[in-house]
Amino acid sequence: MCGIVGFVGTHQAAPILLDGLSKLEYRGYDSAGLAVRDGEKAAEVVKAVGRLKNLAEKTDDGKALPGTCGIGHTRWATHGEPSQTNAHPHVSGNCTGSGSGKVESEVVGVHNGIIENYKELKQKLEHNGYAFYSDTDTEVAIKLVDYYYKKYLHDPIDAISKTMVRVRGSYALELMFADHPGEIWVARKDSPMIIGVADGETYIASDVPAILKYTRTVYYIDNLQCAKITPGEVHFYDLNGDEVNIEPTEIKWDAEAAEKGGYEHFMIKEIHEQPKAVGDTLNSVIKDGRIDLTEIGLSEEEIKEISSITMVACGSAWHVGMACQYVIEDLTRIPVRVELASEFRYRRPILDPKQLVIVNVVGSSIAREADNVFYTLAGPEIAVATTKAYSAQLAAGYSLAVQFGKVRGTITEEEYSKYIEELQSIPTKIAKILEDKERLQWFASKFAHIQDAFFIGRGIDYAVGLEGSLKMKEISYIHSEAYAAGELKHGTISLIENNTLVIGILTQNELYEKTVSNMVECKARGAYLMGLASYGKYEVEDQCNFVTYVPTIDPHFAASLAVVPLQLLGYYISVARGLDVDKPRNLAKSVTVE
């Protein structure tokens, strides 16, 4: 949500900034803007509402903005409606109107995140003579930097440090100071920001794809740090103003991985990349028929001492946790809780030092502060609706479950070998499902007009239904819900009407007959039934109007296969409805505020 870019070097900045912002469009935004400095001249600010192409048109693709130092931003409205005035960048001067054009202002900046105490800070600044032209919390942050900048003898480090201490919330700040030409200053707390260096030029972004075209050498600025960026150099500082050393990281995947590669949309491309994403993730820990977690840093002694596991996640990652909960508890007998991150942070959870918590993103704030990290190897995912990242996370969860079970003695050596063999079969079986996608495309076109859909299942099938339902609602805008099939009679079945689409997921052999029974109850009330079953369960066609099949696999790992037809269904319905598949309305890839 929101995107930041910055550049300082020898080339014209604006075209590079626009190119970087185009790589961040997947994050979601409603307006965009640039601020560029030409030597010691005042910064020129240009902002536009709507798609990035509007900003490109106003600046002749950046060519109309001279200067080799600049910052850019795509905004997702959190404070104030989408408008040119509320768009970033913001300035510290008491200007009115859009804030575009040459601005004689001490500080110009952009911001990702949310300032939770902005009203309190705004009142403080108003008492000190500041006036405000926008409805944003970002303008408050920029003017607070300006306040401390003037108070502390025009020292950017002191100004930024004092601001960071006073601000509550999350932020990635990118700033230019009038009397520091050729410099960009950045700071962060809980919002992502990376800095890349190559050939005497320096790049800033909130995500890797924006700068990968120019460099693979990046720095991840730590929480509560600021940095001074000049051509080809970066200097990092802590809250005390002391310079600190950060080692660069080499990005392994290349820019081509973030392009469509001939597919109509990123989402369908990423669906087809799932065999590789799952295979790469599994192969990172499966060596010679055994699971090796030494690179993650978990010893057998630590695994044996784990008292419980808490999986803290949002959205599709929470659905991964729901599926893995069944697998981990069954194979390891370790209690597992799956928590919504937005709720978890406000509770007083009962935790202990032997409890395990899992995260997944390379370079993320949490990953860099964690004791042990298991990186999923899905590569860049551009479509807002996740597919391959979900599947890679499942693979990681399975690997932990199998290895923990072996180490703790809850599965036998024979079972261990069988499970690893089953895991290694997943990529090929996903590829097999994708060979039959045209049949799902036909079915999707038939149901593109529906208003409601229900996904039902039990156990792992219920967890898969949660993800399938999310895929449908987020990209096709069809109301859909997932229910544990046994809960239908507790109110939900009253919603079933003639031709309501009910999708039953039937991969769990022990629960198969019970779920079929629930589906039949829906059919008796007029529902149109779609079944999702494993090869060999052909008798389900006697009850369902349409059935799609997935290869057989150990039921513990069935979510990896069952989710693929549901991803395809959501995708093809969205296409049939003529919607923007990769950038669904009101949604963003990266959610940095609640």
Image (cartoon, grey):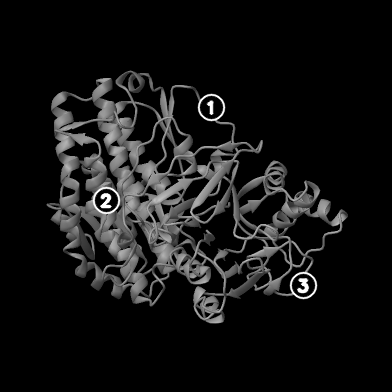
- From the viewer's perspective, tell me whether residue 150 is left or right of residue 138: right
- For the point 86% across and 54% down, the residue is 128
- Image coordinates of residue 210 in percent, x first then y, are 44, 61
Chain-order first, disc 3 or disc 2: 3
- Work out how far the residue at label 1 is from the one at label 3, CA to CA, in angstroms: 50 Å
- Give the residue number, with chain letter if any, for mark 1: 350
- Give the residue number, with chain letter if any, for mark 2: 277
- From the viewer's perspective, tell me whether residue 170 is left or right of residue 383: right
Instruction: Assign a secondary structure to mark 3.
Output: loop
- From the viewer's perspective, tell me whether residue 542 is left or right of residue 12: left
In front: 403, or 163?
163
- Work out how far the residue at label 1 is from the one at label 2, CA to CA, in angstroms: 34 Å
Classify 10 Å Cα crowding around label 3: few (below 14), some (14-19), many (20 and above): few
Chain-order first, disc 1 or disc 3: 3
Q: Quadrant of residue 541?
A: bottom left
Q: Quadrant of residue 72?
A: bottom right
375 to 24, vertically: above or below: above
Q: Can you tell which of label 1 and label 2 is closer to the viewer? A: 2
Q: Do the residues labelled 1 and 3 touch (CB within 8 Å)?
A: no
> Given the image, on which type of amino acid does mark 3 rest?
Thr
Q: Can residue 510 be seen in this view?
A: no
20 to 415, vertically: above or below: below
Q: Is residue 116 visible?
A: yes
- Image coordinates of residue 525 in percent, x first then y, are 35, 63
> Given the image, on which type of amino acid does mark 1 rest?
Ile
In front: 194, or 366?
194
- Give the residue number, with chain letter if any, for mark 3: 96
